[in-house]
Amino acid sequence: MNSTINFLDKSCFIIAGPCSAESREQVLQTAEQISASKKVHAFRAGVWKPRTRPGGFEGMGIQALPWLQEVQETYKLPVIIEIAQPEHIEAALKHNINFFWIGARTTANPFSVQELAEALQGVDCKVMIKNPIHPDLQLWIGAIERVLNSGVQQVAAIHRGFHTSAKNTFRNTPLWQIPIELKVNFPDMPIICDPSHISGRRDLVFDIAQNALDMGMNGLMIETHINPNEALSDKAQQITPFELNELLNHLQVKEKSTANPAFNQQLNTIRNNIDKIDAEIINLVKERLHLIENIATEKQKNNITAFQLDRWMHILKTRTDWATEQNLTKDFAEKLFQLIHEESIRTQIELMKAVPSIK
């Protein structure tokens, strides 16, 4: 049954189920209510749970696999589980489970991913790769490449957010630009969003899920538990099957394109105007960098460092003030001028290397 699933068969591929498989009763009751909605395409459950520190609930292990096999047979829902070691693959296949995800901690370790990739060679399965815990696109790409090189035909990515030092309301910062860059590298690969791990709170799951669909992601993985408040892991971010059904009913799945000629003509007109403005921006940046070259020359003549803290603080303060006056966000202005300033410093250093100072 599992081998017939294709992520791209659905405009929005939905995976739901508990963070952890805790008991046969919990698994089957959750699966029964999830399957009743007819909106979920696969059932997830953690069997082996990697914990940051020892002593926490680390999953029921192999004894949970018969429960999940029963879910597949009874409710016709393909089951997806996390794998972290080759032995996990072997045990799952014995229970007719061949739909896997590689977790964030494992993705961050190329040795572990390579071991899994070698164990997956010749296996008829589907594999989804979560982004690494920290925002490292190359690690994510590397893990995907290792699985693809093993011969697995159906591979997808899972965006579950990143651990950063940024202070926000989320458990893991979305950093949407990173999955966008991943899509550039793998245009045909589905990306599924995990709003549960991004939000860390059940009241934020819907907004993150809608954002993901608005970004064009191919589906969602949502942690769903029959009794979230009693869950043995990640209770704060899990929702009930009823809440899942309500959430899915209210989500808007948008099309990626349309054949409407009037819309396309209007969109092209607006985009042409954007292109003209972008060309002007590039020209202005070029002019700015020309002035930076002049500054570099003068600094070199006077034996002055490229970086000047007072000037940078002045730029940061004035540019963010100017931006907010134009109803642009301070955060956007800071990021924009950090990029410009980094290029300015790089330019100065390169020029100062080439021109000897006048002593």
Image (tube, rainbow, N blue to C red):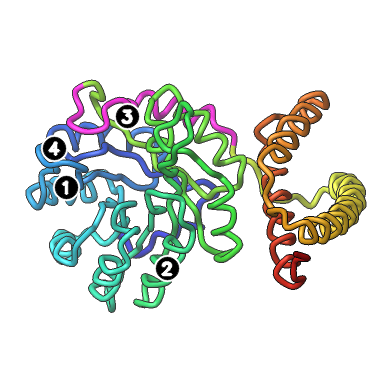
Of marks 4 and 1, the one in the foreground: 4
Sequence order check, earlier mark of 3 and 4: 4
Q: Where is residue 154 in the image (x, y as percent from the top left)?
A: 41, 66
Q: Which residue lies furthest to the front in this view?
A: 359
Q: Are marks 3 and 4 in contact (CB under 8 Å)?
A: no
Q: Nearer the viewer, residue 296 or 150?
A: 296
Q: What residue type is labelled 3?
A: Gln
Name the secondary structure under disc 4: loop
As drawn, 53 above or below 106: above
**Image point (24%, 57%), residue name:** 83
Q: Which amino acid does label 4 sit on?
A: Phe
Q: Which amino acid does label 1 sit on?
A: Glu
Decide if residue 291 is on the left or right side of residue 220.
Answer: right
C-alpha separation, residue under disc 1 versus residue under disc 2: 34 Å
Q: Which of 291 and 334 is in front in this view?
A: 291
Sequence order check, earlier mark of 2 and 4: 4
Q: Nearer the viewer, residue 348 or 82?
A: 348
* Residue wearing tag 3: 238
Q: What residue type is labelled 2?
A: Gly
Sequence order check, earlier mark of 1 and 2: 1
**Image point (44%, 31%), residue name:** 170
C-alpha separation, residue under disc 2 versus residue under disc 4: 30 Å
* Residue wearing tag 4: 57
What is the quadrant of residue 352 in the picture? bottom right
* Residue wearing tag 1: 70
Magenta residues, as a range? 230-252
Of marks 1 and 2, the one in the foreground: 2
Q: Do the residues labelled 1 and 3 touch (CB within 8 Å)?
A: no
Decide if residue 161 is on the left or right side of residue 87.
Answer: right
| Quadrant in the picture for the N terminus | bottom left
Name the secondary structure under disc 2: helix
